[in-house]
Every structure is written in structure tokens, then in C-alpha cells.
Image (tube, helix red, strand yellow):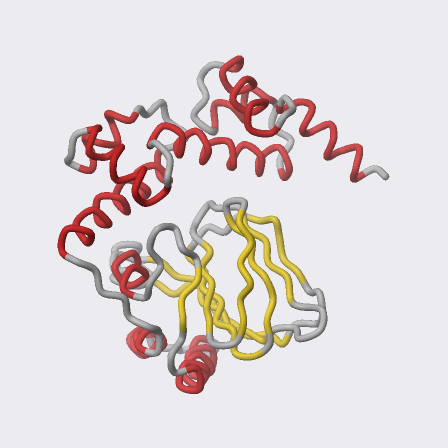
Amino acid sequence: MNSKSDINIYYCGEEACAPGHFFGPAIRPHYLLHFILNGKGYYESRGKRYTVSKGEAFLIRPQEITYYEADKEEPWEYSWVAFDGEKTEEMLKRAGFINEKPICNILKIEDCARYLHQLIKVFDKADSNEYELIGLFYQIFSTAEMVYQKEEEAAEQGYYVKALTFIRHNYGYDIKVTDIARYVGIDRTYLFKIFKHFLGKSVKDYLTEYRLLTAKYMLQRTTYNMTEVALSCGFYDLSSFSRNFKKAEGVTPMQYRSKLLSEIGK
């Protein structure tokens, strides 16, 4: 599918999980929504844990490290859809995924389950119809609780989302806060205020945090050396990379990887 389409659907599925079944920590390349149709479990993102149960959905954003696990007594049953496209952020915002909140409410869970089952069935066909898939995707979103914002907050949300998108696509380059503000089309002071409102932290702190999250993933899942990891994550000074990493994790990148390797070897 064309990446410039309103909505692209990459894969979908459903599962009745075993007690304690988990996935992660991992990074996904697309947006991924899990709709909880029965049972419950928990979801971890950005250092926070959320209990999620029937009638709710949780969102995984591209390139974010996440973890989720089914409850041991009432394991969840869920369906999932991986997607992206031009309309993605607008739809997510309307469904209540604001302020980095990764959970939304599904008001019509039976209808949602039916649309999801139909979507999976159509997707699995060799000759699946793109328009039918997208139509079902919109119907799935129609079952979610819609959130409406005041005009001023909606404008700020737009700037915020645009800044996040720019960071996630460009964190590996030597970008500065002024570059982000210029792309969004506002001054850096106003952008700072918006980030403080939505995230409680500065743009610079968020950019550094995002780079470090990606670095942790690379240290866990790749064999790149420290210089390669640093450059891939936007740190063009190895000492700065090591200093920021140790400040956040309490150990240097080398010590972090060594600890992981020793734990695997046990």
C-alpha cells in the first residue's frame, strides 16, 4: 500500500492468551492497536504500567519500547491491527490518545469485536479488497469513545503531534530544538510550553530520552559497537552518549550491555 494513503493496514489477528502470556520488551515499526475483548492484563510504556481490561484498547506507537502481559487469573483475549497513514494521528486523537495516553475506551465492544473479526477474515483472503479493509477499520474506530477538544488545545495538540513525528523520524540526525520548532512552524519558547503541558518535560529532555530508549533497544538486540549505537541514535559525541546514558540508567552503555550478556549466560 502507498505510505501516503489515509490509512494503510499491514497485519491483523486475534488470540486468546494463556495465563501470563507476554510479549516484549520490543519495538514495532507501525502503529499497533490491541482491542481487549475479554479478560485483562497490563501494558508498560515509557516507564508506566497500565491495567487494561475488556472494553479498552491500548496503543503501541512506532519505535517505542513496550511490554504487555496477560493476567494470570483472567487472561485477556484480544484482536490487533497494525497500521499507519496520513489520517492516523487525527483518528488516534479523536479516540482519546492524547497527552501520550496509550489507552482508550470502546463503548460498543460487541460491534467492535464483530468488525475486527470481519477485518481479519477479509485481510486473510488472497484477493482482499483494500477499500473493504479501510471501511471496516473506520467502523472499528466508530465504536471508540470520541474525545473533543477546545480549539486552542486542539491547535496545541497539532503542534505537539507534528513535533513528535519529526523527532521520531529524525532523532538519528544532529537535530536541535530550533530545528524542531522551525519544522512545526512556531518559536521554541512556545514549543517548550506545549511539551511541558503535554509531557511535563522540555523538548530537549524528550529528544534525549527518545534517543536513549532507542540506544537501549540497540544494545539489547544488536551487536553494533558503542560508536555505531551512539551515531545511530543521534549522539555525535561518544562521551556525551555515555554521560547521558549513565545519568538515565545508572551505568554506562558498555556496562549495560555486559550486564545483559551475563544475565543471558546464567
Where residue 31 appears, x then y in whole percent? 42, 57
| Left or right of 152 in this view: 44 | right
Q: Which of the two residues, 173 or 48, is positioned nearer the viewer here? A: 48
State which quadrant residue 119 falls in: bottom left
Q: Which of the two residues, 195 or 143, is positioned nearer the viewer here? A: 195
Where residue 165 appears, x then y in whole percent? 31, 43
State which quadrant residue 226 falls in: top right
- Image point 21% across, 29% down: which residue? 189
| Left or right of 44 in this view: 71 | right
Where residue 108 appears, x then y in whole percent? 39, 83
Residue 239 position (above or below residue 180): above
Please state, as top left, top right, bottom left or bottom right, where the N terminus lies in the image: bottom left
| Left or right of 135 in this view: 222 | right
Residue 145 position (above or below residue 258): below
Number of numbered discs visible in the structure rendering:
0
- Image point 48% across, 46% down: which residue? 64
- Image point 45% across, 21% down: which residue? 235
Q: Which of the two residues, 251 or 254, is positioned nearer the viewer here? A: 251
